[in-house]
Amino acid sequence: MYQANGTIIIIYLRFKTLLDYLFPSMKYILLSIAFLCGTLLAYTQNDSISNSLKIELQSYTTKTGTFIETVEIPLLTKKAVAIDIKADHWDTTVHNPYINTVQLFPLELNFTDSTYASPVSHKKVITSHYGWRNGRGHKGIDIDLVTGDSVVAILDGIVRFARYANGFGNTVVVRHYNGLESTYAHLSHIGVKANDTLARGQYLGKGGNTGNSRGSHLHLEISYKGEQIHPEYLFDFSSKNAIRSEQVWVTQKWTHARYHNSRRVSKVTVIKSADEALASLAAQPKMYIVKKGDTLYDISRRNNMSISRLCKTNAIKQSSPLKIGQKLVLEL
């Protein structure tokens, strides 16, 4: 816009003298056109006028006195793009409003910060990771705490859900400005309400042992439009409190608990480009679906792996009964 206005100014200066003598009224028309062009361009670019550039031209004298003409050209500044994170599936009564939606992979996520706020003030000790646990998926991480410890939001956002939820106990869900949602479960006290705006590090409740919980801890889930994502794929839960990458691509490997073991840390290699994401789709973990009559011995023998390795990969015991349709991870 500044360049366009600069061009108008040059044209005006070059032809001002000629216009003054030949067409005394034309200069006002030209100024009006310049102003109109600037205003129209402002609207088409969705900008707002914040200030103006005043250019003082040479003075001239008439019978009525000496005059100094000034041209005022509006300068434009970009508006910050407003993101309405409440526009899509905003439901303050259910934990997961995306239950009937299907997401396409890979997912692209973007962060504006390089760090997050630790949800607890003390050293983060993860007692159970995201992954397969006791024959079912554990879709978050458990962070050790003492009942009554303060819990805070990891990123800026708006509270979408703040109430009791079956299994989760007292729960707060915060939707963040990049579309992610963070869930804080088993709280002893909820300190916020739905539609509250939170800054990262802001208090939202106290840790506890409510719902389906064995001992005080914070169950933290990270999801995007209903798809739970392995929290440790996005965030480094060491003392660095680092977000792993400004741009992250998420494949199904990082949204299915069966690909991981809740008893150990998954090896994380962040996918940072679309090309990497598409290439990785060809290297998904190999799975086996249990059929009628299957035993661990049969499955391990057919897939050239030991029973102990099969059990360790899937966080099960050799005595664990198999269920028809159960999915076992053969390779990670």
Image (cartoon, grey):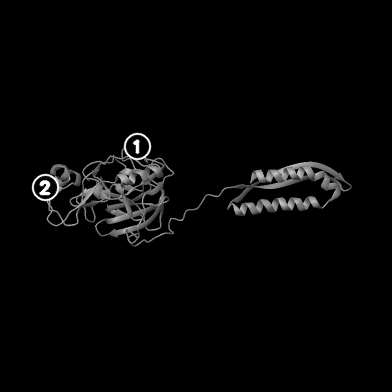
Q: Position of residue 44 (x, y in %)?
A: 60, 54
- Near-viewer residue (174 or 133): 133
Report whether residue 116 is seen: no
Residue at x 83%, y 45% (from the top left corner):
18
Q: Quadrant of the C terminus?
A: top left
- Near-viewer residue (253 or 235): 253
Q: Identity of the amino acid at label 1?
A: Lys
State which mark lies toward you, 2 or 1: 2
Please say if the residues under marks 2 and 1 sit with CB atoms less than 8 Å apart: no
Can you say whether 30 is above or below 55 in the image? below
Report whether residue 54 is seen: yes
Outermost residue toward the top? 240
Using residue 31 as the reference point, say whether residue 223 is left or right of it: left
Can you say whether 261 is above or below 160 in the image? above
**Residue 240 numbered mark, or none:** 1
Q: Position of residue 278 (x, y in %)?
A: 37, 46
Q: Position of residue 266 (x, y in %)?
A: 26, 41
List the residue tagged with mark 2.
297
Q: Identity of the amino acid at label 2?
A: Tyr
Q: Tell me the element at label 2.
A: helix
